[in-house]
Image (spheres, grey):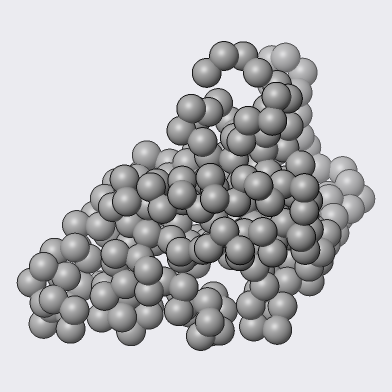
Amino acid sequence: MENQHIIVRVATPDDIHYSNTITNEMESSAKARGTGIAKRSPAYVELKMQEGKAVIALTENGEWVGFCYIEAWGHEKFVANSGLIVNPAFRGHGVAKSIKKKIFELSREKYPESKIFGLTTGLAVMKINSELGYEPVTYSELTDDEEFWKGCRSCVNFDILTSKDRKNCLCTAMLYNPLEKLKEAEEKAMAEKAAAEKQPQLSVTANGHMHHERRRRRFKGNIKLYERWLRFKRFVLLKSKKEGGATGSKKKFFLF
């Protein structure tokens, strides 16, 4: 890829001529990964563009670079940023991160009280989600909207999902809860206020910067450990699929 300026913006009806290119790449990418995403038609992608619920990345010359869209589930209690795809020629240049950040901001703008979630097998996406404030969760914390789960039927691993009673699969579930984040921000503000009133001792590094320790729930910084866990999860679920077929293995595996 030559050095080209990439524009990441909210998609408009003027972008519908990219719909076939986008859906074709979604399908090709899913086949290459050996996993799947809910298959979408060009008409569906065009609808998202017309509704202002999609983000597109283009070069200054109009070459398509990437795409992602918003879906609302469970009477808008949940929102998913779905269909993230990047043109192979532009991968490895931070495009996915820029798109994820833009679609996250758009989701917060359109659905400020909704929980934002995602299912993914990609470590790069998990890392980006973590930086945005998502946290790994169990499937039970996601939407129970049947229409959402029907979208998994086009995935090659759908039989694993059904054999696990929709409680687990190769994808990792991640969730951003705005109410929880608000509560955390309020608790942090209260703690800082209390600390200021008590005038606690602060450790200072050699360069003069104050050092604060705080517990992090996110796996940011532990990506290698998380990668090992994902490999183990994939090994267990695929082994279960091979031994038990669509009905599931008789052996019991416990995954968190």
Which is nearer the eye, 59 or 181?
59
Q: Nearer the viewer, residue 122 or 83?
A: 83
- Quarter-wise, where is residue 7 in the image? top right
Hey, which residue is sitting farthest right in the picture? 197
The foreground one among 71 and 79 is 71
Q: Is residue 241 left or right of residue 24?
A: left
The C terminus: image quadrant: bottom left
Q: Position of residue 98 (x, y in %)?
A: 66, 37
Return the x and y of residue 235 as percentages of the image width and height. 19, 57
Specify whether 53 is left or right of 237: right
The residue most toward the left is 243
253 to 176, vertically: above or below: below
Confirm whether residue 189 shows in the render.
yes
Count of marks overlaid on the render: 0
The answer to whether residue 104 is visible is no
Residue sitting at 59 percent across and 35 percent down?
Answer: 65
User: Which residue is located at x 72 percent, y 14 percent?
Assistant: 207
Q: Quadrant of residue 188?
A: bottom right
- Which residue is drawn at the image coordinates 26% and 75% (left, top)? 159
Outermost residue, front side: 17
Residue at (61% x, 36% y) in the render:
64
Q: Residue 92: x, y in percent?
A: 49, 28
Q: Residue 213 occupies which quadrant of the picture?
A: top right
